[in-house]
């Protein structure tokens, strides 16, 4: 496709990563971190558009595909609906979301969670969500590479979208997120909190909290920062435990590989940029000679 205006060097770097190229941390030069014959996330999105197939995201139906950029679509596919639970509460806040309040959770680590209180807050969370995917240790490298590459394509796609496309798109995402929550509540009422269960076992009668102390969705006041996961008090919500020593070694190797890949790909991108400039200079020189002859 057409190359958008912008940083030429960065474009070639992101294009190389999208092809699956990276600098081998074993000192063997440039290699592929994925099978180049397999489809990348960008290829899958293009195929879905050509076949008018479902997007694979409950948040973005097929009819809304043309209402956003491909980068936005890929980002939303990295999250799925979740519900606010007692372990999401922060002691620093006197008022918080109600249990069961709908939010978004990363599909890769299943720990980073966002609970925006309005459509505007959902839109404001985009930069946080994008940064998380790039930094998430569990997110695949091809997803990270495709997100970077689609940033260049989005510069062209935004020119074809209406001025208020983000507002319209996230209004739909917000409505579907809360409709999905309502459908889940109707189909399967949420389980009673563990703390309530324990009190029911110890006492014959349970005292109901006064209404003014029992927060509801309407009573929740806006907050500026989004919520992160904490250690779960519920048995079913306990995070998966990993061997921290092995994780640390893997993270170190991963970081070294990324640094090596960045340096080598940047060198290749600089060479490609210089070659483009040289071809352009030759082309201008050829046109100049032709005008002199006439």
Image (cartoon, helix red, strand yellow):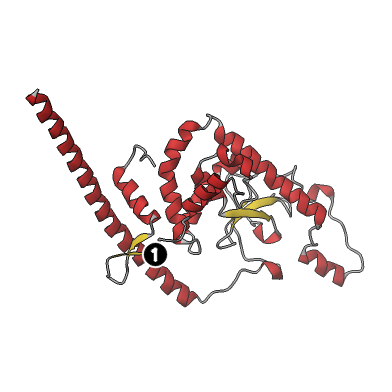
- Residue at the spot x=63%, y=50% of the render? 115
- Residue at the spot x=66%, y=66% of the render? 232
- Residue at the spot x=46%, y=76% of the render? 246
Coordinates of residue 24 in the picture (x, y in percent): 32, 67
Query: For the residue labelled by badge 1, is the local secondary structure a helix, a strand or a loop?
Result: loop
Left or right of 74: which side holds 98?
A: right
Tell me, yes or no, if residue 94 can be seen here: no
- Residue at the spot x=12%, y=28% of the render? 290
Q: Which residue is mark 1?
A: 33
Tell me, yes or no, if residue 142 can be seen here: yes
Residue 10 sits above or below residue 31 on the image? above
Q: Residues within 10 Å of mark 1 (few under 14, many from 20)?
A: some
Question: Looking at the image, which residue sits at the far right?
Answer: 204
Coordinates of residue 83 in the picture (x, y in percent): 69, 55
Coordinates of residue 178 in the picture (x, y in percent): 71, 46
Coordinates of residue 288 in the picture (x, y in percent): 12, 29
Question: Looking at the image, which residue sits at the far front?
Answer: 294
* Quarter in which the N terminus is drawn: top left
Question: Looking at the image, which residue sits at the far top?
Answer: 294
């Amino acid at each position: 496709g057409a190359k958008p205006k912008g940083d030429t060097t960065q474009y070639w770097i992101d294009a190389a990563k999208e092809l699956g190229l990276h600098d081998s941390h074993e000192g063997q030069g440039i290699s592929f971190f994925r099978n180049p014959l397999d489809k990348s996330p960008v290829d899958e999105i293009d195929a879905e558009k050509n076949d008018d197939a479902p997007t694979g995201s409950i948040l973005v139906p097929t009819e809304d595909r043309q209402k956003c950029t491909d980068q936005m679509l890929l980002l939303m596919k990295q999250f799925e609906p979740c519900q606010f639970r007692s372990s999401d509460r922060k002691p620093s806040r006197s008022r918080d979301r109600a249990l069961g309040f709908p939010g978004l959770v990363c599909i890769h680590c299943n720990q980073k969670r966002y609970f925006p209180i309005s459509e505007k807050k959902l839109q404001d969370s985009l930069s946080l969500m994008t940064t998380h995917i790039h930094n998430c240790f569990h997110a695949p490298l091809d997803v990270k590479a495709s997100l970077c590459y689609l940033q260049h394509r989005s510069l062209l796609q935004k020119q074809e979208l209406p001025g208020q496309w983000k507002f319209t798109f996230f209004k739909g995402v917000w409505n579907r997120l809360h409709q999905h929550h309502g459908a889940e509540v109707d189909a399967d009422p949420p389980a009673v909190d563990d703390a309530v269960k324990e009190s029911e076992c110890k006492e014959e009668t349970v005292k109901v909290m006064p209404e003014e102390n029992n927060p509801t969705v309407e009573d929740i006041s806006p907050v500026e920062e989004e919520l992160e996961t904490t250690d779960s008090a519920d048995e079913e919500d306990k995070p998966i435990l990993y061997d921290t020593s092995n994780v640390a070694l893997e993270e170190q190797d991963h970081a070294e590989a990324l640094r090596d890949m960045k340096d080598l790909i940047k060198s290749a991108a600089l060479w490609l940029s210089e070659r483009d400039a040289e071809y352009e200079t030759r082309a201008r020189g050829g046109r100049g000679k032709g005008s002199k002859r006439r």
